[in-house]
């Protein structure tokens, strides 16, 4: 089966600054992929390449098997894109927004659009400029969902929004997946959201993909190991697979990559007075990889 | 100016300078060139034209400087998105300062070029005119009542924009133009008595309106009433409008639809002016000279069709037509680009919403060209017809009637002045239809490179046109005329080279389909035909200039099309330069 999204050795620089370095990532149909990373890590740049808004310096981008720069019409017709930026023109009213989008997408479902408007409490004559930030986000969501895109790209869609709007956005994503099996790529800082809806996760740091794996696999292979010592220890213990260390008085805590049995064996060999091992949360993995060393430098190769 | 006032001024002017410095410097350089040309050319008629051009450039320059301050900074709840207004509203300045700084600059914006206009029409037989002799005593004295009237006019227009928006601003300008013509029929003292209270009342009103807007007071009753009408119309249209049948139409509506209102409202604004002018003309014909109390040399029948009257005639409609034309032809991309709005991509006139729609770059360019071309043709023919009808008014001397060309030639005595008048009248149309948006700026990116490209490709072509018209005129330096063939050849070579380069790029990127090419060819041949028609009407006997014009207008759009597609596509995908 063809991938919906395929980045192959993608690199991009802005002046002297590398924004993406040799990124390789594939998204299969029907998957929900959470893209996480710090601010400036390259998430939005990667998404812009998927939309054809940036031309790669090297490497290739294929969306539904097509080049989004060379063939924007067939590619963009199948993508729904919503970003944290409020790009909707304030002068439009809701019914005008619907009519504008309807002109581009033959798959536009007016009944569904009206239903979404009712759910989101959007009136047809509401002017976008006069809506609150949350309501504008709902309007944007309505406009991208109503034509039932094959691929939904959300670039930090719930940034700065209240929990109710975030719930609406996530609910819509969940419905889209459950009812229609569409592909979703979304970037977010809110890891609880990613944890809730994503079935695979890709982390990007300094323009490189650190890992791209299924979320359950990620949790199974990452553990928080806390070592207790009888005296304060200045140097972190040597532990294979450790991504990140954190010191607190007489304890050292590490994010360790590896299967549970393997990690247990390695941890006991350190020789500490106590060892506590538990599954790492997504947030701990994120922080660990954000602050720690690049995975390839630690464990010998970046995951695809 | 006190240090406090200087600080406030810089607070306003700083961001404007940062954003528009290229326009300012370019405009100043152009004015310098005009001034030099005025010294080179000996003929008074051409000097007057150059003074007019100088004044128009100055008008444009000051308008660029002051415009954003007046239109954006002081319209917090009006049609245009108040990008700058929020900044202005939170500046540490008083409400009064927020009013009078823009207002002061608005006055300067209108009055300085107006002074130049008036001065340029002082009897050329007695006063030696150069662009540097603005301060002649006679010229200053003749400015007294226009200054008072213009002050009132501008104040009212600005006030109306504050309270009711840009639409009312246009209407007020049109009304002001009409009133100004009537003002020529009454005494100077009456004008001053009328103008002073109106000016003061307008300033007070402006202060109140700005204060209300700044501190979030409820909209006025009139604004509420207008909003209700708008909402009622909008509701009625909700169910009536069918879906767009194609992406092309949807994009057309998105980029131009919301800004089509000037097409209706601009003529409405111009109508009072035209009516007043016609009434004034009729009164002169029937009752003889009624201009008691006014400088007779300005409106005497023998001078009636002088070139200076073209300035008078042109000024009011220009002020109303130009903004309307810019809005309708430039539409959304123009404003997004100039507002530096976050919707617009850097150095581009393509907003993000359009960039991610499933529509090809060719289609977007085609959409814009279609509207620009249509607007250009309509405005061109509108202006042409307007001039023609005005000049076909029964002759002043006796009962003689004649065609536009015959009458004008009779009274002007020089064909060249007709050309000059037409060029001035058509200038905004030519400039905006051809340079909006400027593909060279898309492609070259940096301002100095795009400026160099513009001078090379467009400056040479316009110089060729100008010299071809002037070559038989005795006042034009023979050496300059000798340069004409060389200039034309250089222009053609440069255009052909640019065209070949652009075409090769197009083929590499596979951006153009045969259908689109035919579409664009039709659009631009229509525009070229309109301009050629306009010029040939006045210049039929001048075969050489006409041929040059035809060549230039035929080749110029082709290059524009090619580079516009390349530039917009490059912008859309933000490629490296």
Image: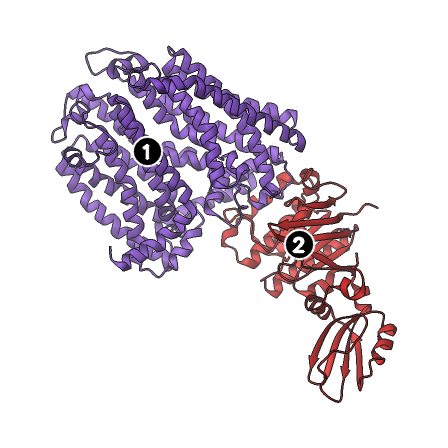
Quadrant (top left/top right/bottom left/bottom right) for the N terminus of chain B? bottom left
Along the line of sight, which residue is nearer the eye, A268 or A277?
A268
User: In purple, which chain?
Assistant: B
Residue B212: give x, y in percent of width and height.
34, 57
Q: Callout 2: few (<14), some (14-19), or many (20+) C-alpha neighbours within 10 Å? A: many
Can I make out residue B260 in this image? Answer: no
Q: Is residue B183 visible?
A: yes
Mark 1 nearby-residue class (10 Å; few <14, some 14–19, many ≥20): some
Instruction: Decide if residue B566 is on the left or right side of residue B477.
Output: right
Q: How far apart are marks 2 and 1 (CA)?
A: 49 Å
| B215 in relation to B335, above or below | below
Q: Respond whether the residues carrying marks 2 and 1 are from the same subunit.
A: no
Residue position marked by numbered label 1 in the rendering: B56
Residue A244's spot in the image, x, y percent?
73, 71
Q: Mark 2 points at which residue?
A: A154
Q: What colour has chain A?
A: red
Cβ atoms at labels 2 and 1 below 8 Å apart: no
Q: Is mark 2 on a helix, strand or loop?
A: strand
Residue A285 located left or right of residue B540:
right
């Amino acid at each position: 089966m063809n991938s919906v999204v395929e980045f192959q050795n993608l690199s991009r620089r802005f002046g002297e600054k590398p924004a993406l370095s040799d990124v390789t990532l594939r998204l299969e149909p029907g998957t929900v992929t959470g893209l996480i990373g710090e601010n400036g890590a390259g998430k939005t740049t990667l998404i812009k390449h998927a939309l054809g808004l940036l031309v790669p310096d090297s490497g290739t981008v294929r969306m539904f098997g097509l080049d989004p720069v060379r063939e924007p019409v067939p590619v963009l017709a199948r993508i729904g894109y919503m970003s944290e930026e409020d790009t909707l023109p304030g002068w439009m009213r809701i019914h005008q927004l619907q009519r504008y989008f309807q002109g581009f997408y033959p798959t536009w479902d007016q009944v569904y659009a009206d239903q979404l408007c009712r759910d989101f409490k959007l009136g047809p004559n509401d002017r976008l400029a006069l809506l609150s930030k949350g309501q504008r986000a709902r309007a944007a969501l309505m406009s991208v969902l109503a034509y039932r895109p094959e691929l939904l790209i959300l670039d930090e869609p719930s940034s700065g929004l209240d929990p109710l709007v975030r719930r609406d956005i996530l609910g819509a994503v969940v419905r889209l997946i459950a009812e229609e099996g569409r592909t979703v790529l979304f970037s977010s800082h809110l890891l609880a959201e990613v944890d809730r809806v994503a079935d695979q996760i890709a982390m990007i740091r300094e323009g490189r993909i650190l890992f791209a794996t299924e979320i359950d696999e990620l949790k199974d292979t990452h553990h928080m190991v806390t070592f207790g010592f009888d005296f304060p220890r200045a140097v972190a213990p040597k532990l294979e697979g450790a991504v990140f260390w954190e010191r607190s008085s007489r304890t050292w805590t590490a994010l360790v990559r590896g299967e549970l049995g393997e990690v247990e064996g390695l941890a006991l060999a350190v020789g500490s007075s106590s060892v506590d091992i538990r599954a790492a949360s997504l947030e701990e993995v994120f922080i660990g990889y954000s602050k720690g060393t690049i995975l390839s430098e630690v464990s010998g190769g970046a995951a695809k | 100016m006190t240090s406090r006032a200087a600080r406030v001024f810089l607070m306003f002017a700083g961001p404007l300078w940062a954003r528009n410095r290229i326009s300012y410097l370019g405009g100043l350089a152009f004015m310098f060139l005009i001034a030099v040309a005025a010294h080179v050319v000996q003929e008074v008629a051409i000097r007057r034209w150059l003074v007019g051009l100088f004044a128009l450039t100055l008008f444009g320059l000051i308008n660029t400087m002051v415009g954003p301050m007046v239109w954006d900074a002081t319209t917090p709840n009006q049609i245009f998105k108040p990008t700058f207004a929020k900044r202005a509203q939170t500046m540490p300045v008083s409400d009064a300062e927020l009013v009078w700084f823009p207002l002061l600059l608005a006055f300067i914006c209108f009055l300085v070029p107006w002074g130049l206009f008036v001065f340029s029409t002082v009897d050329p037989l007695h006063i030696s005119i150069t662009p540097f002799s603005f301060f002649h005593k006679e010229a200053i004295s003749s400015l007294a009542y226009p200054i008072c009237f213009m002050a009132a006019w501008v104040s009212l227009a600005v006030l109306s924009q504050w309270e009711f928006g840009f639409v009312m601003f246009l209407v007020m300008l049109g009304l002001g133009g009409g009133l100004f013509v009537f003002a020529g029929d009454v005494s100077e003292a009456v004008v001053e008595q009328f103008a002073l209270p109106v000016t003061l009342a307008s300033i007070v009103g402006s202060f109140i309106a700005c204060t209300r807007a700044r501190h979030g007071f409820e909209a006025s009753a009139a604004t509420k009433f207008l909003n209700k009408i708008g909402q009622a119309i909008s509701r009625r249209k909700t169910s009536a409008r069918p879906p767009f049948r194609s992406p092309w139409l949807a994009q057309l509506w998105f980029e131009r639809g919301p800004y089509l209102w000037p097409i209706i409202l601009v003529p409405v604004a111009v109508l009072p002016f035209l009516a007043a002018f016609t009434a004034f003309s009729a009164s002169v014909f029937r009752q003889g000279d009624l201009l008691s109390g006014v400088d007779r040399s300005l409106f005497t029948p023998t001078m009636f069709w002088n070139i200076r009257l073209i300035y008078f005639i042109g000024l009011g409609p220009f002020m109303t037509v130009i903004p309307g034309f810019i809005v309708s032809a430039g539409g959304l991309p123009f404003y997004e680009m100039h507002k530096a709005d976050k919707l617009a991509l850097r150095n581009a006139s393509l907003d993000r919403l359009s960039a991610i729609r499933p529509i090809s770059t060719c289609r977007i360019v085609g959409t814009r060209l279609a509207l620009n071309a249509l607007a250009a043709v309509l405005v061109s023919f509108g202006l042409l017809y307007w001039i023609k009808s005005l000049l076909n008014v029964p002759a002043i001397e006796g009962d003689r009637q004649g065609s536009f060309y015959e009458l004008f030639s009779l009274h002007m005595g020089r064909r060249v002045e007709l050309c000059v008048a037409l060029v001035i009248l058509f200038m905004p149309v030519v400039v905006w239809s051809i340079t909006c948006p400027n593909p060279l700026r898309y492609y070259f990116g940096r301002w100095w490179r795009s400026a160099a490209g513009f001078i090379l490709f467009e400056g040479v072509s316009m110089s060729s046109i100008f010299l071809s018209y002037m070559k038989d005129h005795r006042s034009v330096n023979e050496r300059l005329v000798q340069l004409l063939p060389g200039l034309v050849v250089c222009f053609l070579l440069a255009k052909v080279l640019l065209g070949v380069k652009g075409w090769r790029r197009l083929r590499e990127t596979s951006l153009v389909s045969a259908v689109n090419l035919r579409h664009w060819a039709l659009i631009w041949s229509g525009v070229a035909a309109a301009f050629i028609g306009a010029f040939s009407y006045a210049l039929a006997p001048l075969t050489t200039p006409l041929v040059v014009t035809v060549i230039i207008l035929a080749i110029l759009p082709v290059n524009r099309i090619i580079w516009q597609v390349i530039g917009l596509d490059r912008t859309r995908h933000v490629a490296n330069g």
